[in-house]
């Protein structure tokens, strides 16, 4: 049963193969044991990908703190943030956490454009906002795009990106 609060719709992960496939009679093709095993694999994969996403966000937070305490380390840390953002984007997307993937993609795009030799407090704040947003969305286990709250968050991120990229080329869609 979905849980709704403050216009955020939190959906439980669909852990059955039948929910994913719809009205398909798999018993005509596969044994019930095979269907049950496939259902467990889907459920376990989603859980594993979600755990990877959480671990990645924890690492992002640590890297952000490293840069905030010493921008001289940014040359080594920024590429790690880009790589982690990319990884989180993929894991979250595969697990059905589209809003998390969108936030990670935005963080990746911004960090790819940062000059590690001249990070500003504003740029550090923008990366911190993204990481805080990731933490919040993951803590609520918001699946999909997050409904109206997800749309509002996406608009805020779009505004931040437009301000950030106003004098720079827009990053590639990857």
Image: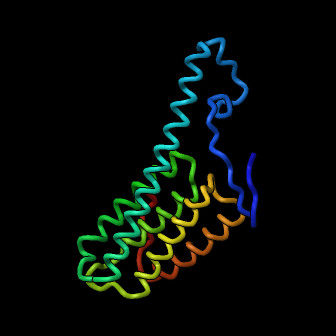
The colour scheme is rainbow
Residue at figure coordinates x 29%, y 86% from the top left: 118
Q: How many marks?
A: 0
Q: Position of residue 134 (x, y in %)?
A: 52, 65
Q: Is residue 148 left or right of residue 154?
A: right
Q: Which residue in the rendered view is the most extreme toward the bottom? A: 121
Q: Position of residue 31 (x, y in %)?
A: 59, 13
Q: Quadrant of the N terminus?
A: top right
Image quadrant assignment for residue 125: bottom left
Q: Position of residue 101 (x, y in %)?
A: 51, 57
In-front residue for pair 102/135: 135
From this view, report whether residue 20 is shown above or below residue 75: above
Q: Is residue 103 left or right of residue 55?
A: right
Q: Is residue 38 left or right of residue 78?
A: right
Q: Quadrant of the C terminus?
A: bottom left
Residue at figure coordinates x 31%, y 71% from the top left: 78
In-front residue for pair 141/81: 141
Image quadrant assignment for residue 172: bottom left
In-front residue for pair 40/84: 40
Residue at figure coordinates x 57%, y 16% from the top left: 33
Image quadrant assignment for residue 107: bottom left
From this view, report whether residue 79 is shown above or below residue 51: below
Q: Position of residue 105 (x, y in %)?
A: 47, 62
């Amino acid at each position: 049963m979905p849980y709704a609060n403050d216009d955020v719709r939190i959906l439980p992960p669909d852990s059955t193969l039948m929910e994913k496939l719809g009205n398909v009679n798999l018993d005509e093709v596969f044994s019930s044991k095979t269907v049950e095993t496939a259902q467990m694999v889907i459920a376990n994969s989603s859980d594993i990908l979600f755990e990877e996403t959480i671990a990645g966000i924890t690492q992002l937070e640590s890297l952000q703190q490293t840069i905030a305490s010493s921008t001289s380390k940014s040359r080594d840390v920024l590429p790690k943030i880009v790589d982690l953002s990319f990884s989180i984007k993929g894991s979250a997307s595969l697990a059905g956490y589209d809003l998390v993937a969108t936030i990670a993609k935005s963080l990746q795009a911004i960090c790819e454009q940062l000059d590690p030799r001249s990070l500003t407090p504003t740029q550090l704040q923008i990366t911190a906002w993204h990481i805080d947003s990731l933490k919040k969305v993951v803590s609520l286990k918001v699946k999909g795009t997050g409904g109206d709250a997800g749309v509002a968050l996406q608009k805020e991120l779009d505004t931040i990106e437009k301000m950030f990229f106003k004098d720079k080329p827009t990053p590639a869609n990857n």
